[in-house]
């Protein structure tokens, strides 16, 4: 069967590295982006230049109608989605008493509802085929508490709950659902912390460095591969040993 992957938030960072890895492994890839069409187009051109099949597809994952339209387009142009990597996410730091309803709703909208929307859009075909694979991208802050990141941490904890429960529900349909929980990864998302903090975080990491998007792409690729055929409902932490 043709392998078709949809990667949300694939214009930059971790999602981009995942899209590259999957395309080079032979998947046709839907490269979802939100605002950075330039980056998504650049990636698609790179992949096509290597002989891979890829298209850029815009959608705000928090909006169900946009996600449904995106998935229909991927199905039309590449084929039914056999692998979903729900990666799109937003993060930021704020004291809990400063968290507004708007911020709370946006984080849950993108990080959790975004995963729900994408999963529900690809499921009918996977259930029909009794086959498919879903990988969510949570965070070590979805496994442990994070000061000044309460909202983000809540969304990422919920994503792990979604992954584990859905894995149980979908196992009889032959669909595996797993999660990768990255530690501190050197992408645009963490640049707001500043170079000094990032150096200190690298020093606190037992492996002595920040993670790369490619480190996470390797974990996603493993969970998506046949090598992980008996693994479902699991959280694979890739953090260089950051959390005990
Ligand atoms: P990033 O560099 O900030 O990239 C974010 C990606 O998500 C971009 O492709 C962006 O698209 C997309 N995106 C944002 N809002 C979206 C929306 N509403 N709809 C669709 N796409 C949207 O982030 P990253 O570091 O690669 O993070 C990727 C995932 O890993 C996130 O879920 C994040 O929480 C998680 N994570 C990251 C780290 C880390 O240290 N970096 C650690 C743990 C977990 P545009 O470019 O088009 O705006």
Image: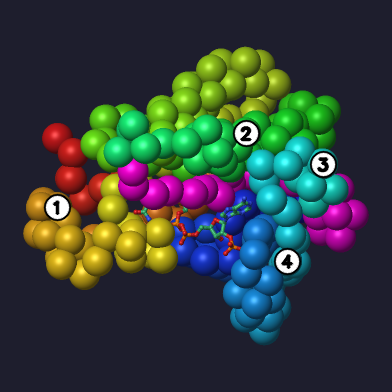
Mark 2 or 3, nearer chain start: 3
User: For mark 1, what is the residue?
Assistant: 205
Q: Position of residue 140 (x, y in %)?
A: 31, 39
Q: Which mark is residue 65?
A: 3
Question: Does mark 2 have its CB less than 8 Å from ligand 1?
Answer: no
Q: Of the residues tagged 4 and 3, which is closer to the observer?
A: 3
Image height of 235 relative to 63, above or below: above
The answer to whether residue 58 of the structure is visible from this angle is yes
Q: What stretch is highlighted in magenta?
A: 72-94
Q: Which mark is residue 113?
A: 2
Q: Where is residue 96 in the image (x, y as percent from the top left)?
A: 33, 33
Separation (CA) of disc 1 from disc 2: 31 Å
Separation (CA) of disc 2 from disc 4: 21 Å
Whether the magenta-drawn stretch holds residue 84 is answered as: yes
Contact? badges 4 and 3 (CB < 8 Å):
no
The answer to whether residue 43 of the structure is visible from this angle is no
Separation (CA) of disc 1 from disc 4: 35 Å
Separation (CA) of disc 3 from disc 1: 41 Å
For the residue carrying disc 2, how many other residues have a C-alpha within 10 Å: few (<14), some (14-19), or many (20+)?
many
Q: Position of residue 198 (x, y in %)?
A: 20, 62
Mark 1 or 4, nearer chain start: 4
């Amino acid at each position: 069967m043709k392998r078709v992957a949809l990667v949300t938030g694939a214009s930059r960072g971790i999602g981009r590295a995942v899209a590259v890895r999957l395309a080079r492994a032979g998947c046709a890839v839907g490269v979802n982006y939100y605002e950075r069409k330039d980056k998504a187009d650049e990636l698609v051109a790179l992949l096509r230049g290597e002989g891979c099949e890829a298209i850029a597809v815009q959608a705000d994952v928090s909006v169900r109608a946009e996600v449904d339209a995106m998935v229909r387009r991927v199905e039309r142009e590449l084929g039914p989605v056999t692998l979903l990597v729900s990666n799109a996410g937003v993060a930021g730091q704020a004291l809990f008493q400063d968290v507004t309803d708007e911020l709370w709703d946006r984080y849950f909208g993108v990080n959790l509802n975004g995963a729900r929307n994408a999963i529900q859009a690809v499921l009918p075909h996977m259930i029909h085929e009794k086959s498919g694979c879903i990988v969510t991208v949570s965070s070590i802050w979805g496994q442990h508490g994070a000061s000044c990141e309460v909202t983000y941490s809540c969304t990422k904890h919920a994503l792990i709950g979604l992954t584990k429960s859905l894995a149980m529900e979908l196992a009889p349909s032959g669909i595996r659902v797993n999660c990768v929980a990255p530690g501190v990864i050197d992408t645009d998302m963490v640049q707001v912390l500043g170079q000094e903090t990032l150096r200190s975080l690298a020093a606190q990491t037992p492996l002595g460095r920040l993670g790369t998007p490619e480190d996470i792409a390797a974990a996603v690729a493993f969970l998506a591969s046949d090598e992980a055929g008996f693994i479902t409902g699991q959280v694979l932490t890739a953090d260089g040993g950051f959390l005990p």
